Image: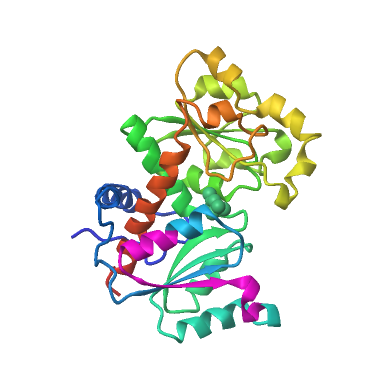
């Protein structure tokens, strides 16, 4: 039985191709379970998973909880706003106290980059990163890659462009690492003010013209403008951003061929993507969400059952 090399899923940087392939291949089994009338298997019976969300989430939190319940794990949800974090408890004390209640897996979203790395070195549970600041969001990239494989058959040689607020995006970083490992040709597109320093060193192409980026692409992954991380300061107005970088029906019509459109959500309709595109024939945004549950089932299964 194949097993992961990694003990925790903290990001996709340095995760070997065999591990990403194993997760993506295992996902097919879990997608089949999601289509059954009774969507539940006893795989993680007796295991306890805590969902430790210090930041807001709709898709990731619900998707992890559904995945955990469909694998028959015992699930505990933690909401920072109503916890003793509000009384000044540190992240490490919070984690150690929860772990003292005999937890097996911690799924964590936190605003600080590296929060999962920090805890995984000081605690005994298995950690899965559900998004850490602007650093990584590995299960989002895995579900994006799963969706691209469904649509295009293989990631090897596939031209994928990530468009938008690259600098603030944990989704972009995890996609870049994962897609490059899997042999895709990766590009990014956005205003220079939204590009991280030294991006070329990762081995990606950079476009500042969205029509050129579309010419390059078999698929585009359109990112949300993260106004809560001050992204609005990086361009004059949302209207100008939409005119310069927005993925619109007009732009896709001018291209004259199909390009797969992904978006991790939540969407700012009329800013980075037009509704006609988000809800249109090339969009795989809702299949991404369905695949997210199966990807998280695969990750929980492979991490949760890996021998010590
Ligand atoms: N894609 C994503 O992470 O969405 P949420 O913030 O709703 O979890």
Instruction: Give the image quarter of residue 205.
Output: top right
Tell me if residue 212 comes above or below residue 293 in the rendering: above
- Magenta stretch: includes residue 67: yes
Tell me if residue 46 comes above or below residue 51 in the rendering: below
* Residue 269 x, y percent position in the rendering: 63, 35
* Residue 302 x, y percent position in the rendering: 30, 62
Residue drawn 36% across the image and 65% down it:
69
Residue drawn 47% across the image and 46% down it:
177
The quadrant of the rendering that contains the C terminus is bottom left
- Magenta stretch: includes residue 245: no
Residue drawn 63% across the image and 64% down it:
112
- Depth check: 59 or 152 in front? 59
* Residue 152 x, y percent position in the rendering: 35, 30
The quadrant of the rendering that contains the N terminus is bottom left
* Residue 90 x, y percent position in the rendering: 64, 80
- The magenta stretch is 64-85
Tell me if residue 281 comes above or below residue 235 in the rendering: above
Describe residue 11's horizontal placement relative to residue 66 as left or right: right
Describe residue 51's horizontal placement relative to residue 20 as left or right: right
Tell me if residue 113 comes above or below residue 189 in the rendering: below
- Depth check: 203 or 172 in front? 172
């Amino acid at each position: 039985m194949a097993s992961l090399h990694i003990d925790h899923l903290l990001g996709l940087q340095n995760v070997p191709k065999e591990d990403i392939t194993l997760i993506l291949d295992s996902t097919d089994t879990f997608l089949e379970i999601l289509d059954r009338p009774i969507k539940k298997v006893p795989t993680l019976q007796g295991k306890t998973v805590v969902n430790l969300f210090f930041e807001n989430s709709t898709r990731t939190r619900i998707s992890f909880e559904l995945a955990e319940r469909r694998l028959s794990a015992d699930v505990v949800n933690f909401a920072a706003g109503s916890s003793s974090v509000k009384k000044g408890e540190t992240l490490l004390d919070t984690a150690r106290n929860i772990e003292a209640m005999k937890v097996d897996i911690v799924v964590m979203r936190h605003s600080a980059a590296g929060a999962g790395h920090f805890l995984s070195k000081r605690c005994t549970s298995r950690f899965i990163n559900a998004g850490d600041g602007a650093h990584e969001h590995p299960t989002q990239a895995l579900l994006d890659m799963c969706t691209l494989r469904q649509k295009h058959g293989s990631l090897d040689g596939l031209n994928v462009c990530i468009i938008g607020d690259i600098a603030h995006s944990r989704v972009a970083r995890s996609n870049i690492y994962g897609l490059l490992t899997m042999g895709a040709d990766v590009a990014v597109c956005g205003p220079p003010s939204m590009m991280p320093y030294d991006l070329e060193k990762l081995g990606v192409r950079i476009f500042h013209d969205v029509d050129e980026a579309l010419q390059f692409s078999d698929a585009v992954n359109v990112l949300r403008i993260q106004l809560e991380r001050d992204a609005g300061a990086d361009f004059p107005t949302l209207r100008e951003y939409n005119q310069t970088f927005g993925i619109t029906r007009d732009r896709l019509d001018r291209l004259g061929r199909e390009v797969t459109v992904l978006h991790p959500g939540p969407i700012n309709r009329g800013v980075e993507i037009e509704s006609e595109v988000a809800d249109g024939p090339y969009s795989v945004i809702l299949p991404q969400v369905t695949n997210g549950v199966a990807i998280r089932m695969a990750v929980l299964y492979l991490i949760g059952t890996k021998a010590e």
